[in-house]
Amino acid sequence: MPHDLVKEQRIAKCLAEIARQPDFPAFSTHIQEVMAAVEDENASLRQLTDIVLRDYSLTLRVLRMANSVCYSRSGRALVSVAHSITLLGTEAIRGLAGGVALFEHYRKISPGLKELMLLSILTANQTRAVAATINYRRPEEAYICGMFRNLGEVLIAGYFPREYAGILSERKENGLGEREACLRVLQFSFEDLGQAMAARWQLPDRVGQCMCQVEPSRVAADENEELVALRAAASFSHALTAAVYRREPEGAAARVHLLIQDYSPALGLREEDVNAVLEAGIRETRATFAALSIPVDELRLRKQAEAVLANLAAGGLDEPPAEPVAEAPTGEEFLHQISRDVQSAIKASGDFDLHGVILMILEALYRGGPFDRVLFCLADPDHTIMLGRLGLGEGAEELRAKFRVPISVRGGLMGTALVRRQDLLVTAGSSFAETEALKSVGAVSLGVYPILVDGVLGGCLYFDRLTARPPPAARTLELLATLRDLAARAIAIRRPMGA
């Protein structure tokens, strides 16, 4: 049987075995959901906001990135995930969400995987730093390519620990390189498996293309220059991580010096550039670890990097100040700040993004209420039925799709509130009408705030809770009403709404 056919069969068998693991199907679906969320311009903002808000550590990371010097120019802190995504762009968030999801999933399986995932974060941050140094146009694309660079090794270590131990043994006892040891034990390489999984997850093509080691001296003259730069950045950063953090400190400076020489034709890096890349890798990784409540000293990063840098450049590496990672704001303070931000956006220009403003308002309800599901609804052209248009929260999309409330007494309590243009808050099913209203949406409490545009019922904000909690405070309800009025004002300025 041809060797390539044997290799493909073994990879397929390996993927099938991984897919049968109890923890894998849901995680695989989540990764694919993240990667699919940028296909449609409007849907992607809603979907990505929803994905980010479901993960507290990801929420912190997105807010931190948006408030970094690189992105924030106003001098005022951003607190809205929806606004942050608009600022950063969907590609950046897709890479961040996919990377954090990968990190969180595999670091919990075993101590060995935790270390591999921390090394992945280092490689990702170093790749982004290299991309910035060489003026690569999409540094966040470089980040995700670096993050997934050792996906194949992570999969083997996580799901085939016996084979992984055999590979490590071959390398240590027989002095084999990584690829040679993999071929002897698995008959395929880490990169082969990583590329196969990347294709299954429908990751961007360039992620898979960056999984193979680049030999700069063998780059063909007709290859795409941008792709060559990206592959070289990921390959260099992967090798840099291995040279500095995966081996004994002795000889690390010599290994890094050789890497600089090897990759100079493709990247043009100098020793001082590598100093900055290592510094950025540690600084950004420390911030990620802090957001995920993981101590940075697990990999002895500082000590090992200092040993290398001391031999590469004079002066060593000063300890940069630790960057505090604030809690993601919630509650009345968050509602108040979002109200101010929406008001500022509307006042600043009539050319504001109405879709983004509505999402910020929904996010405020979701986090500030807090509520489990929130919807923005619009009346149909005949003003007889209220229809769900946008939603956030677990199960909100399913609720949005079936949300059709007659604007009449036939619509029960919600329909009656809409007819009367009155705010509705049901916190317990103490009457038949209240019980029926809650039963119709499967909630234990709900609210409906009509949106009047120039005196005409144009839509409403819907919010609910799926578990019993104390009712919202009076101040919270006032702020919800303020956000509803801001939604009405924004719609009046920008009608008709295209979302």
Image (cartoon, rainbow, N blue to C red):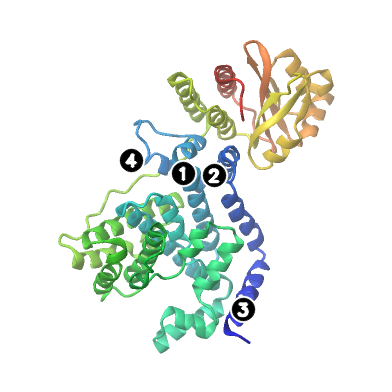
| Distance from Cα at disc 4 to Cα at disc 1 | 14 Å
Q: Is residue 261 left or right of residue 61?
A: left
Disc 3 crowd rating (10 Å Cα; few below 14, some 14-19, many 20+) is some
**Depicted 346 relative to depicted 24: above or below:** above
Which tag, 2 or 1, sits closer to the chain's start?
Answer: 2
Residue bearing the label numbered 1: 62
Which tag, 4 or 1, sits closer to the chain's start?
Answer: 1
The circle on residue 10 is 3
Residue bearing the label numbered 4: 69
| Distance from Cα at disc 4 to Cα at disc 3 | 47 Å
Q: Quadrant of residue 235?
A: bottom left
| Distance from Cα at disc 3 to Cα at disc 2 | 36 Å
Which tag, 3 or 2, sits closer to the chain's start?
Answer: 3
Which tag, 1 or 3, sits closer to the chain's start?
Answer: 3
Q: Residue furthest top?
A: 455
* Amino acid type indicated by mark 1: Val
* Badge 3 vs badge 2, beta-carbon distance below 8 Å: no
Residue bearing the label numbered 2: 52
In x, y percent, where is residue 406? Answer: 80, 23
- Could you tell me which quadrant the N terminus lies in? bottom right
SS for callout 4 = loop
| Distance from Cα at disc 2 to Cα at disc 1 | 8 Å
- Give the mark toward the camera: 3 or 2: 3
